[in-house]
Image: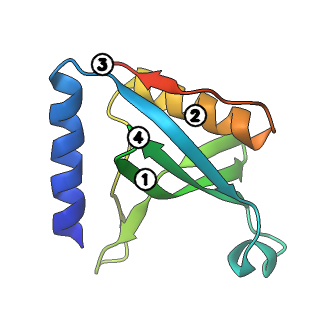
Amino acid sequence: MCFIYAILYKNIKAYIRSGRILEISNIRISKSGSLLKDNPNNRILAYVAVTLDNSIRLDDIRIVNGDNGIFLGFPTRLRKNGSRKNVVYPISREARAAITNAVMSKYRGEDVSVTSLTK
């Protein structure tokens, strides 16, 4: 599984460096599910799947109600020593801002058109 994420990460990085612009082509938000409803102290508000260029899908992004406000939590995996390792995450401020703005707009119920991610 980690091997697949490593290849995906390298491909996205190469794609961005090539000068092409990635577009957020679809955002799916799930506000339901047993993981969200079973624990009243749960800070996760929703799970998100973001599709880039109709070809790459990023699952398990979380909308989290943190101490300093709402933010996006990108997928992590649990290591054998108990620490967490980022799996997929934006590598530039611009990409993080574009994904966050598009997801939060969709979460608030606003109409979200295709959003471009630049270098």
The residue identified by callout 1 is 58
Answer whether labels 4 and 1 touch (C-beta < 8 Å): yes
Residue at mark 1 to residue at mark 3: CA–CA distance: 18 Å
Work out whether mark 2 precedes mark 1 in sequence or the reverse, and give the earlier one. 1
Q: Quadrant of the N terminus?
A: bottom left
Q: Is residue 52 left or right of residue 97?
A: left
How far apart in space, not on screen, are marks 3 and 2 (Cα)? 16 Å
Q: Earlier in the sequence, mark 4 or mark 1?
A: 4
Residue 6 in the image: state x and y as whole percent.
18, 56
Q: Which mark is residue 119?
A: 3
Q: Is mark 3 on a helix, strand or loop?
A: loop
Looking at the rendered structure, the kind of residue marked 4 is Leu
Q: Which residue lies furthest to the front in this view?
A: 54
- Sequence-wise, the earlier of marks 1 and 3 is 1
Report the Cα–Cα distance between label 4 and label 2: 14 Å
Where disc 2 sits, the SS reads helix
Position of 99 relative to 85 (above/below): above
* Residue 116 on image: x %, y %: 45, 22
Q: What element carries label 4?
A: strand
Give the spatial CA distance, label 4 vs label 3: 14 Å
